[in-house]
Image: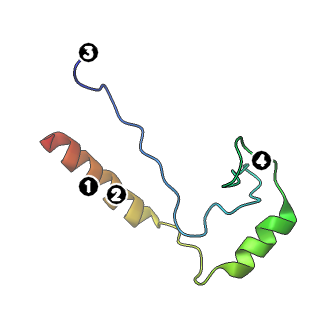
Amino acid sequence: MSEPLAYFITWTTYGSWLPGDERGWIRHDSSGVKEPENAIRYHSQDLLKETPALLSQLQRELVDQTIREHAARR
């Protein structure tokens, strides 16, 4: 198959998935997913310079539309 069937695109926004998170996390200097650690998560929250960025439904729809339009051109 020369053309990909699909792409799986994922990313996090600022402050939405911090070290120590309950969903698991990865320490930069080691390998593997780490277990949740509340102390690290709270410390990471304290270090944030801005409030976490979460996309509204309208913003999610715009991202979806933009990706679809770009994929159609490709």
Read off the residue under disc 4. 34
First of labels 1, 4 by sequence position: 4
C-alpha separation, residue under disc 3 versus residue under disc 2: 28 Å
| Residue in the picture at 64% in, 60% down | 17
Q: Are marks 2 and 1 in contact (CB under 8 Å)?
A: yes
Read off the residue under disc 2. 63
Q: Nearer the viewer, mark 2 or mark 4?
A: 4
C-alpha separation, residue under disc 3 versus residue under disc 4: 36 Å
Q: Amino acid at mark 1?
A: Thr
Quick one: SS at disc 2? helix
| Residue in the picture at 85% in, 63% down | 38
Quarter where residue 48 is shown: bottom right
Read off the residue under disc 3. 1
Read off the residue under disc 1. 66
C-alpha separation, residue under disc 2 versus residue under disc 1: 5 Å
Q: Are marks 3 and 1 in contact (CB under 8 Å)?
A: no
C-alpha separation, residue under disc 2 versus residue under disc 4: 30 Å
Does residue 50 appear left or right of residue 46 in this picture?
left
First of labels 3, 2 by sequence position: 3
Q: Amino acid at mark 2?
A: Val
